[in-house]
Image: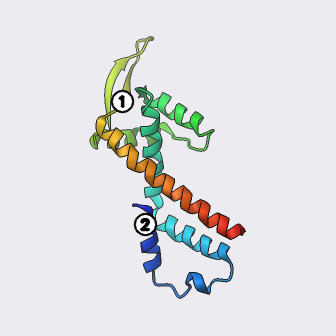
Amino acid sequence: MTLRTLFSRLQSLDDPCTPGQLTNSNQYIRILYVRGMAMIGSGIKRGTAELAVLSVLQDGPLHGYELARRIEKRTNGALHFTLAALYPMLYRMEQQRWIRGSWETSANGRRRRCYRLTPAGKKKLSPLEREWAELFHALQQLTKAAHA
């Protein structure tokens, strides 16, 4: 869901409380946030996870555990994936052909699945980055307005 779509859906909700009727901009920001999160709930989490995986895989192929570790390290612990949550997502991303997994044998003889970014994954990454940049910019504008 794009930011433009989200805001048009928020505006179309039947609510007697419009921005012009609110005296406190923080109230409006809170309403936007609560409604937005309710509407896109798991979609925003999935979008964050997909962006994180695709971004990290740009640097080269990784197995699941190392992928989760690198995401956590790059985000200073803000994003943490359990392997139980990560592997189903990697499977879905393989089905969408954004990544490709192959079995490899590690130096100690253990088999593990290594994931690589595909051309389709690179193509998906660009709009994801743009959508997140738009969202962060919009949120910055909202918070600046609240503090003005």
In the image, taking residue 141 as reference, residue 61 lies left or right, namely left
Q: Which residue is mark 1?
A: 116
For the point 47% across and 74% down, which residue is it?
Answer: 10
Categorize mark 2 by other alpha carbons within 10 Å: few (<14), some (14-19), many (20+). few
Q: In front: 77, or 119?
A: 119
Q: Quadrant of residue 17?
A: bottom right
Is residue 137 left or right of 118 when viewed as pictured? right
45 left or right of 143? left
Q: Nearer the viewer, mark 1 or mark 2?
A: 2
Where 38 sits versus 75, above or below?
below
Is residue 76 depicted above or below 26 in this figure? above
| Relative to 148, residue 44 above or below | above
Mark 2: amino acid = Arg
Tell me if I can see residue 34 in this picture: yes
Q: Which mark, residue 20?
A: none
Please provide percent x and percent y for residue 128: 42, 49
Q: Residue 28: x percent and y percent?
A: 61, 75
Q: Residue furthest right?
A: 147
Which quadrant is the N terminus positioned in? bottom left
Q: Nearer the viewer, residue 47 or 148?
A: 148
Q: Amino acid at mark 1?
A: Arg
Q: Secondary structure at mark 2?
A: helix
Residue 43 % position (x, y)? 43, 57
**Which quadrant of the view contains residue 74?**
top right
Q: Which residue is mark 2?
A: 4
